[in-house]
């Protein structure tokens, strides 16, 4: 408990966020599993999964905030890292199906049997192990971000050109993953998952567990981001964002700092994708679509840049609105999203977090 | 000795792999009393020679002013010394040992050359203290930066630099909220945090009030001695108030060099600056 009171004093919003995540991680499974369906406070499994999905989006938003809010890299391709993490998890889940697929092949996933493949491609080996898959969830997005950043930051590409490159990156990956012969299921992607770690993905208990895992990942992700942004490296990041040359001429290798924080951000996005896939039950190339990455940027803009908790808030608000509006007004939803983005940019440049900061909180024995 | 320490002694990573040995530039060798050698430097941008076979020597501890009309190559000169621009020909040495043309901007900064930009360039979203903390000499790789914490000696160092540049009262203010002059002083303070041996100061008093530029003059004069200071400036009165030795640049070459009096009576300087007519700005 002391960690919460300490956090609450130092970083009110962060303390509230972690407290809420802890409460949700404990309460939501209880309300879902512990209460009968007739009970007024009962949460349906559908709702639990929906909330879990939101938390994954929130983690992705936090990753975007690290890159955009703190480093100043307007990334329009973070969906690529999210999807790669998702694919790594999807490959594990595919291998777990074993011989229970439609074709009943003991080793090959259904889509490979369908394509008349005789043996497992080399890059599918190892994914039957959960630990290996977890490593790949982090390593693949991390490696891609490293390679991308290595070339982009060293050649000092910045601003809108860098944004376009990130966009091109995710678009190229989308086109590649649409191809059947790449070996990731083409446009159908990976689906029909049965179980994770031996627990059936259809079971309520597994869904509640995945929700709790998402809440825990978001909380740990927040703590890790907070550790970085409060360190001298974090100060350096915002310094680079505001005055890159000055940072370089006081002796920092700017590209190295950018590179590692960008890699960290990509790994976070990968983890978010890995938690997302077992909850939605499918991963396909549309996750690489540029629009998905742009939406993540809108979440951060609406929530408020460079606050971390703002990114979480933005992701939750917009996705809730999206779930509601797509059901209530399917045609108007995209207009709603566009209008929201324009209005926030015009009237709330600091996002919802900026609005919250304007509310005067009374601090003990000090000025607000 | 803890297990961890024993393990470290057993497996000293920096001695196992050569590439992990921290890269330290060779010590600054000032045996001949000259801190900066620029010889035969030539830079052209699309046919236009911004710097043309320029030779310049800065002595250890001196305060040098560089003047010259617009387009004389003053800023390009700064860019070459700090590694931003690579010359087409020539050599640039820092002391006897350090070849500036083979180093990147951060390496040059860590070797001991600090540069103040023409426009005050500070981290506006950080406090004055954080600005100085970021600039402080020390390991600047990613991992040490992540784990760095200010210790008492470093806090004292920050305070003493604040005292030098006269910003003690502003320590917790956001740098963006400072006045124009204060930002210039903060930037000079940031350079001092790096313990530089050579300070390059580009137009320090542009846009300053009379009092502010007098204080800046005092500050720059007091900084020379333990380190060398090179000032690029347009304001002749300011140059006169601080300069022992003045270098006049014109069309990428050194036109004249000497005391302020010598320089301003040099007929070639008068010709360039004044187009042959006597002018009050240079005569004061």
Image (cartoon, rainbow, N blue to C red):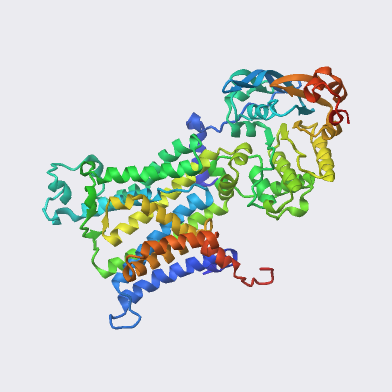
| Viewer can see residue B61 | no
Percent across and percent down for residue B144 are 56, 43
* A80 or B72: nearer the viewer: B72
How many marks overall? 0
Residue closer to the observer: A19 or B266: B266
Residue placed most toward the observer, B115 or A133: B115
- In depth, the one of B141 and A329 nearer the eye is A329
Q: Indicate left or right for B67 with A60 as reference.
A: right
Q: Is residue A202 above or below residue A306?
A: below
Q: Please give left or right for residue B130 compared with residue A150 in the image.
A: right
| Left or right side of B30 for A57 | left
Q: Position of residue B174 (x, y in %)?
A: 68, 54
Residue at image coords 58%, 66%: A357
Where is the C terminus of chain A found, in terms of image quarters?
bottom right
Q: Give x and y (percent) for residue B249.
A: 74, 23
Residue at 30% from the left image edge and 74% from the top image edge: A44
Residue A170 lies, with reference to residue B240, above or below; the image says below
| Residue A79 visible in the displayed image | yes
Position of residue B69 measured from the top left corner of the image (x, y, whole percent) = 74, 27
């Amino acid at each position: 408990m002391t960690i919460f009171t300490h956090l609450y004093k130092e970083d009110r919003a962060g303390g509230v966020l972690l407290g809420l995540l802890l409460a949700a991680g404990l309460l939501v499974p209880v309300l879902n599993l512990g209460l009968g369906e007739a009970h007024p406070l009962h949460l349906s499994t559908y709702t639990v999964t929906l909330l879990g999905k939101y938390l994954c989006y929130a983690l992705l938003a936090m990753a975007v905030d690290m890159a955009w809010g703190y480093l100043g890299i307007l990334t329009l391709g973070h969906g690529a890292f999210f999807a790669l993490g998702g694919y790594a998890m999807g490959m594990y889940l595919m291998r777990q199906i074993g011989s229970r697929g439609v074709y009943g092949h003991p080793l090959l996933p259904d889509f490979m049997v369908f394509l008349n493949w005789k043996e497992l491609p080399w890059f599918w080996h190892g994914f039957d192990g959960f630990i290996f898959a977890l490593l790949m969830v982090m390593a693949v997005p991390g490696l891609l971000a490293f390679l991308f950043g290595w070339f982009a930051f060293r050649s000092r590409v910045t601003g809108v050109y860098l944004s376009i490159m990130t966009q091109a990156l995710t678009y190229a990956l989308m086109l590649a993953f649409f191809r059947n012969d790449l070996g990731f299921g083409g446009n159908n992607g990976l689906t029909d998952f049965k179980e994770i770690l031996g627990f059936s993905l259809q079971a309520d208990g597994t869904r509640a567990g995945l929700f709790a895992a998402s809440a825990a990942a978001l909380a740990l992700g927040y703590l890790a981001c907070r550790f970085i942004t409060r360190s001298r490296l974090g100060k350096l990041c915002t310094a680079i964002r505001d005055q890159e040359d000055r940072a370089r001429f006081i002796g920092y290798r700017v590209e190295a700092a950018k590179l590692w924080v960008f890699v960290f951000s990509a790994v976070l996005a990968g983890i978010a994708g890995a938690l997302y896939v077992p909850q939605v039950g499918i991963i396909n190339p549309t996750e690489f679509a540029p629009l998905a990455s742009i939406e993540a940027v809108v979440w951060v803009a609406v929530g408020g840049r460079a606050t971390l908790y703002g990114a979480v808030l933005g992701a939750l608000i917009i996705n809730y609105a999206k779930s509601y509006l797509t059901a209530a007004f399917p045609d108007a939803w995209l207009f709603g999203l566009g209008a929201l983005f324009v209005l926030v940019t015009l009237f709330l440049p600091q996002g919802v977090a900026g609005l919250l900061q304007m509310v005067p909180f009374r601090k003990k024995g000090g000025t607000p | 000795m803890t297990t961890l320490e024993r393990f470290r002694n057993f497996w000293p990573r920096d001695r196992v792999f050569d590439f992990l040995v921290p890269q330290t530039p060779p010590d600054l060798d000032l045996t001949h009393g000259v801190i900066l050698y620029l010889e035969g430097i030539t830079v052209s941008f699309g046919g236009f020679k911004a710097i043309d076979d320029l030779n310049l020597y800065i002595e250890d501890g001196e305060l040098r002013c560089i003047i010259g009309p617009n387009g004389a190559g003053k800023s390009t000169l700064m860019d070459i010394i700090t590694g931003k621009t690579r010359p087409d020909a020539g050599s640039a040495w820092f002391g006897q040992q350090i070849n500036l043309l083979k180093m990147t901007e951060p390496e040059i900064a860590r070797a001991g050359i600090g540069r103040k930009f023409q426009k005050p360039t500070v981290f506006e979203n950080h406090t004055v203290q954080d600005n100085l903390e970021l600039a402080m000499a020390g390991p600047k790789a990613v991992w040490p930066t992540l784990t760095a914490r200010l210790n008492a000696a470093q806090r004292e160092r920050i305070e003493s630099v604040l005292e030098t540049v006269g910003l003690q009262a502003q320590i917790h203010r956001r740098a963006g909220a400072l006045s124009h002059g204060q930002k210039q002083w903060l930037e000079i303070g940031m350079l001092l945090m790096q313990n530089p041996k050579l300070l390059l100061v580009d137009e320090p008093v542009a846009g300053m009030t009379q009092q502010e530029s007098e204080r800046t003059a005092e500050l720059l004069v007091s900084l020379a001695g333990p380190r060398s200071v090179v000032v690029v400036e347009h304001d002749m009165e300011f140059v006169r108030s601080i300069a022992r030795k003045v270098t006049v640049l014109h069309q990428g070459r050194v036109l004249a060099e000497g005391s302020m009096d010598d320089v301003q009576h040099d007929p070639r300087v008068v010709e360039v600056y004044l187009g042959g007519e006597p002018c009050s700005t240079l005569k004061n």
